[in-house]
Amino acid sequence: MDFNWLFFWILAAITVTSAVAAVLTTHIVRMAFYLVVCLGAVAGLFFLAGAYFVGAMQLMIYVGGTVVLIGFGVMLTARTPFVRMQTTPDQWLLAMVTAATLGAMLLQATLRYPKPIEPPGIGEPAVSPGRLGTAFLGLRLEAASSGTSSQTGGDGEDAESLGVAYLLPFELVSVHLLAVLIGAAYLARPRRRPDQETGREGEHAGAERSGPGEEPRPAAVAIASGGDS
Amino acid sequence: MIPELVLGMGAVACFCLGAFPTVRRASQLVAWFAVLFAGAVVGVQTGWWHGHAVSEPWYAAFGNLFRWMGLGLGLVLLASMRPGASERHEAESLGCLLSAILGLMLVGGAADLITLFLGLELISVASYILLYLDRDGPRPEEAAGKYFYLSILSSAVFLYGLSYLYGLGGALRLDRLTHAWASGAGTLGDASLGAMAAVLVLAGLAFKITAVPFHFYAPDVYQGTSHVNASLLSVLPKAAGMAAIIKLLLGIMVGGGLPLWQVTLAVAVLTVTVGNVIALWQTHLRRLLAYSSIAHAGFMLIGLTAAMTYRRPHQHPWDGAGALLFYLVAYVIATAGAFAALSVLRRGNRPVERLDDLRGLARSNATAPRFIAWSLAAFMFSLAGIPPLAGFWGKLAVFFSALDVGASPSENPLRSRLLWLAVIGAVNAAIGAAYYLRVVGAMFFTEDDAQDRQQAAVVATPAVVAVFACLVLTLAIGLSPGSWFQAAHSASPTAVPTIVEVSLDTAPATH
Amino acid sequence: MELPLAHASQIPLIAYLLVGSVLFVTGITCMIAKRNLIGILIGIELILNAGTVNLVAMSSPFVAGSGLPALDGQVFALFVILLAAAEAAAALAIALTYYGGYATIDVDHGDRLNG
């Protein structure tokens, strides 16, 4: 039992407890709070596993960005009747049965995870952000760093075949983000009531929407063009 | 790679043009140009059509098949998007459409797990934004909300399965994973983790192809949106999901010796039965076509099950995966054509939505509604599997691939089950014919008796041309299926190491 | 770029995978039990995190029994984090419109589409 184990146990315990607590609580604000704790602890686990950059991104994007979004969602939609989520007993039963089945299956499967095919790569250096960055540019630096061996096939491999270059996925994610951004800009603006058949834009459909109800189009344009740059 | 880049740039250009009101109209041109140019590039790269060159590896032919499918669907959907209805979101809709097609092409051509996952996600993201932009449907927010939440749930489950697939196989590249699973990575220690990975991946993809435990959203979502979006939802995710299933389950996981066919057999039987039986009661056209698309996923899974149980030598005529691909092509053409035909019909200023709205369409005085009625009838016959249309050969291929395993001479313990599978499929095809014939009957054998409604009319849009193109393709495949069969078979994964032949019935021994 | 305690002792991979499976199960439970769009979103975030924990652990050089090239899993995990953020934004927008349309984000009220 050394520090590595100690930190792992602490972080794993926090992760698991807060995840379970998020399920058990009926208060939406508490639920979001438990999610923050859980994601933060997962970031800690990433650091412990040597994935420093991923851990940092988990903190920045998830804990810093996503959870703030969720917080906004909670604030904007939480009116007194909806803060507490009542779950009926039969839903709890269904959820618990599913959880027990899934948990048993996963536990049984995970505990038999195969022994490592190769001795663990102790000598392998941690992935530095620089290597990650070059990989996003489509370059692989494995050939330069010795000690890297792939799992299968012991034949002589060139650096290219060690993995994939991530330029294409990187560009794809950019298209994703652009599409989602524009979509979100459209979704969040007021729309006409479903029962209005005319093409004119209706008044505010909901009390919360204080956006530009008469001229929704320029607002969307502004956000969309902001995302394009 | 160039066609994908062209489409991606086209999508980004459309999104950007949407920001400037003065040049928004140009997005239409950009979209058409991107799809046509990408098509030209694919054509030049592949020599227009030598999809069945024997020397070509299967995955190249597979990628090209899905490229052509994506581009063809892109043209049909572009033509069916009516400029008038969603004028204000035209640029964004076109951008989403282009990125959805891009997603399909990427899934078809993916060589690693990341591209495959991102391609599938690109389709989902684009489709739920399209669902929201649409103003034609009766309840867009509910349709989009339902679709969105289930879609990201399925993606998350799929991702969790992929993480195990990656961990067991030790690579992200599909060819390496194939190699690793074939040499026993999937059953290392115990088969349970490999089985878990397979079940999770299948569960995630079952949503995309509307297979049974995850099919329930389709009727509601289709009903809540417009014809064009329903068309997109019923073809693009299904084709991409099938491509991913072939690549991951058939190309990688079967090699590990997992008894996956048991799962797919059960899912196939349930899907085909549920889809066909519930469709009998539907009166709303989009709900009917939703159940029909569920049923067709079941028929395709029959081919998948046959492919999983018995590996055939290269280009065997009744190879299950080739049958699946052929079926997919026939289904996609007929469904896209049917939705395009429905989208041009109007009664007054209302779209045609219910079965009753089609009454007497074939007896109309004008030529255009009669043409639409005849085309719609052809698509329905093709979906029902009536010779000599494309759908008939698809059903034939799928059933024969199952029967062929059933009739294999070896002491194959699966024989009787595959025979039953083919029988159940055939019974379901007969049930399915009933509701397709109801649509045809409404158009041809009933009078338009409603006095208060306006005559059905056809809005002249490019969609009529798209309907015509789909009709020609359905007839052409139906009349000369041979070369199309060959193309489909050359794209079916035969390069998979054939370690297991028929011993899939028993649980694999621990290595 | 190494933590001083990195080589003290290696955590077995199974420990990470167990954390991941707990996250997965709680996420699924959350989605079933909570009848609230934000609650469902939180469940989905938990499931996605289960996937990233697995990916990172399996490719980690500091985890005993992984032994995979480190880059692949981490890059995949990064893409997943990005996607999750993008989808959270869209989910929030959908929850807001849903709220505007129904004045509730309880999914059981949104069943006007039937038949």
Image (cartoon, rainbow, N blue to C red):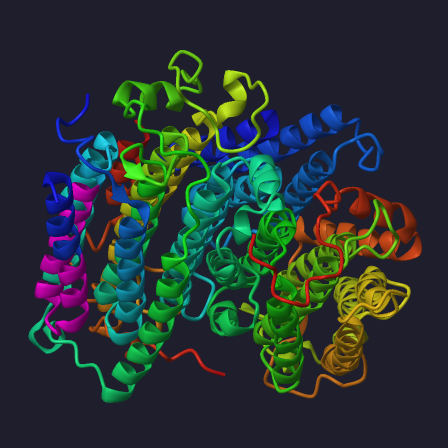
Q: Residue A63 at x, y = what percent?
A: 15, 45
Q: For residue A120: magenta?
A: no
Nearer to me, A28 or A22:
A22
Report the magenta residues as a range: A16-45
Total label count?
0
With respect to residue B67, does B211 lie above or below?
A: below
Which residue is depicted at the point 78% across and 31% down? B56
Nearer to me, B26 or A67:
A67
Q: Is residue A2 left or right of residue B189?
A: left
Nearer to me, A207 or B489:
B489
Quarter occupied by residue B452: bottom right
Quadrant of the rendering where the N terminus of chain C is positioned: top left
With respect to residue B493, does C96 lie above or below?
A: below
Q: Is residue B471 left or right of residue B33?
A: right
Nearer to me, C33 or B6:
C33
Q: Residue A218 at x, y = what percent?
A: 26, 42
Q: Is residue B104 left or right of residue A213?
A: right
Quarter occupied by residue C69: top left
Quarter occupied by residue C7: top left
